[in-house]
Amino acid sequence: MPGQNYSTMSEFILFGFSAFPQQLLPVLFLLYLLMFLFTLLGNLLIMATIWIEHRLHTPMYLFLCALSVSEILFTVAITPRMLADLLSTHGSITFVSCASQMFFSFMFGFTHSFLLMVMGYDRYVAICHPLRYNVLMSPRDCARLVAWTWAGGSVMGMMVTMIVFHLTFCGSNVIHHFACHVLSLLKLACGNKTSSVIMGVILVCVTALIGCLFLIIVSYVFIVAAILRIPSAEGRHKTFSTCVSHLTVVVTHYGFASLIYLKPKGLHSMYSDALMATTYTVFTPFLSPIIFSLRNKELKNAINKNFYSKFCTLSS
């Protein structure tokens, strides 16, 4: 990263929750702390269950395990800093720390989106080409797909971070967000090329995310067509039930993201902006393990067998 940024600005101020009433901050801290801990414990429980239960050593659950890892790391990249700032009177963050947070949040966020796309492809192969499933989704191929999602997330994170932090930041150093959010940070940039860089960053991010969503939709178009060809209602219900948890997480993931990034330009306060941003960074990762645990019958039964029943026995 060029030295001109360091000479212009050495730190930023995360304004985030600074405008909130002081008596509300401890309440928000406790709420987000509980959601953060539940997100960690829920995803660790899913990973431990898949590791212990040999029946779950299948491609679908391998991808789910990788998704849990990406959610944990995405949450850890943003939430601890946010929690610390809720109890702090001066939310300063160094230039390097801000760049690091942006890189890791983009890396794990895009990895999460790529994994959701791969999971959609897995369901497509399982339902539309069941006889070729073991060939197309062999352990080696699954490992490659997971590796490519992490590599893709890393490239996206590095590319966006380097583009943004090659800009010159001058004037105010106050970021009106609780994290080093790319759009809030771009508002502080100055120079002749700023507007073109902003459009470039938005284009790269939107193209990648919409591309993932488009491929997921295409997968489900073929899946629904295949399910409708099943003669019995029971067979259709059983087949579609294997997709419900993934489909629910996709709708939640893109739904909350749309609320934040596609909201109309109009009258909105800093309070609503900060609270809406937490729906994607805190609430969505919080919901994901709940959805997979409750909507996936096989995983739910495995959790009950390996943990819940033993916990009840010990407590009694």
Image (tube, helix red, strand yellow):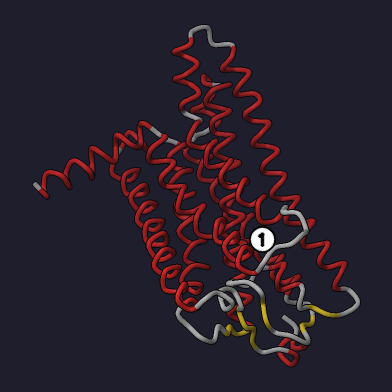
Residue 212, percent from left and from top:
67, 43
User: As rendered, which of 140 and 287 lies closer to the eye?
Assistant: 287
Residue 184, percent from left and from top:
70, 71
| Residue ID at (46%, 37%) | 59
Residue 294, percent from left and from top:
38, 38
Q: Amino acid at mark 1?
A: Val
| Residue ID at (44%, 20%) | 238
**Residue at which label 1 appears:** 155
In the image, residue 84 above or below residue 157 = below
| Residue ID at (55%, 83%) | 91
Q: Secondary structure at mark 1?
A: helix
In the image, residue 72 above or below residue 212 = below
Picture mark count? 1
Whether residue 208 sits left or right of residue 145 in the image: it is right
Q: Which residue is farthest bottom?
A: 7
**Circle 1: is it few (<14), some (14-19), or many (20+) Cα within 10 Å?**
some
| Residue ID at (33%, 36%) | 300
